[in-house]
Amino acid sequence: FGLGAVKGIGEGAVEAVLEARNRVGHFRGLAHFAAEVDPKALNHKVFECLIKAGAFDGFGYTRAALWKGLDGIVGWAQRRCDEQEAGQGSLFAGATVIEPQPDATLPEWGEAEKLRNEKEALGFYLTGSPLSQHEALLAGKVTHTTADLKEAVEHEGQVAVAGVVARVKRIKIKSGANAGRLRAVFSLEDEHGSVSVSLFADTLQKHDHLLQEDAVLLVRGTLRMRTEVELNAQEVVPLAALELEQVAELDLQIGPRVEQAALLRLRDVLADHAGELPVRLTLCRGDERVCIAPAGRFKVRYAPALVAAVEAILGPGAVVPVMSVPDDAPALVG
């Protein structure tokens, strides 16, 4: 990937890197790089952009370690350059130069932070996608990727596209029945590209709190073609809601010392959260497990309040969601 395409790297910086590389050959590490490239051409921001882009990954340290050690290494390289310009370099001629090294024990940034920094430096995700870790959750719910939408626009009906939110704009409506209210436009990005998504006033009012930069969402809506394909959102679904959609049953773990009074309180809690989700009780006695299916009237509505109320009676971790993922769930289209 061309250095000139890394955001924040100018032509002068690229030429300075190439000059040093042609002169010394392979760079041993970040300190060697910093010492050999003309410091007047590379400011601190350039180093940061190169780390985010993964340009120094070949040095054998995590990007987090390179980032943490950057100040000390650049400072050392600048002092070395100043000494050489002042003629002090000859005092140490033939001596072994000890280059500062990043902390090899520092773990990598979390996947989300690594990809976010990568996209900031390159304009796209290079080593992965924020959607990858949610592929099982999205299976069967995504109908199209952004690459498929130009073909889909010719057909009527809804599409469901998953992606990462970017460049959110809220715009005041100037005329019509919704004059004075807000609509929103944002870019929904997946590993194939992006699509512009519009939310009109009523839809925005319902989903505005979900439109956060870097949020992963499933957007259901209809397509239209203007200068490019646009998606008119009718529903915006966060990952947490998708997880709830896949809960098929709640397994309540009951330990050996639960008294009858606690079970009566549990009965009342289940009745207070009546819904359509089945519940099963698992009686735990050492290595033995006995599962009991309560009467249908004890079906519940899964919510954080229910989990908190049940775990206050049965103990932390007593509520175990049983997920339902179809065996034949298709992989993401594309």
Image: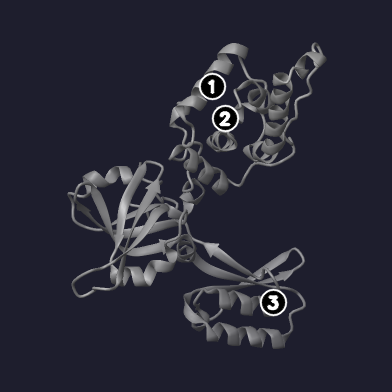
> What number is the disc on residue 16?
1
Query: Quick check: 94 left or right of 205?
Result: right
Q: The residue tagged with tag 3: helix, strand or loop?
A: helix
Marks 3 and 2: which is nearer the front?
2
Mark 3 touching mark 2, by CB under 8 A? no
| Above or below, comparing residue 179 to residue 158 in the picture | below
Of the image marks 1 and 3, the number of the one nearer the N terminus = 1
Residue occupied by mark 3: 314
> What number is the disc on residue 30?
none
Figure quadrant of the C terminus = top left
Marks 1 and 3: which is nearer the front?
1
- The amino acid at mark 2 is Leu
The Cα atoms of the two marked residues, 1 and 2, are separated by 8 Å
Mark 1 touching mark 2, by CB under 8 A? yes
| Rendering coords of residue 194 (x, y %) | 35, 46
The Cα atoms of the two marked residues, 3 and 2, are separated by 60 Å
| Rendering coords of residue 56 (x, y %) | 60, 29
Q: Is residue 219 visible?
A: yes
| Above or below, comparing residue 333 to residue 26 in the picture | below
Q: Nearer the viewer, residue 243 or 197?
A: 197
Residue at 55% across / 48% down in the picture? 112
Residue occupied by mark 2: 42
- The amino acid at mark 3 is Leu
Q: How is the image coloured?
A: one colour
Which picture quadrant has residue 294? bottom right
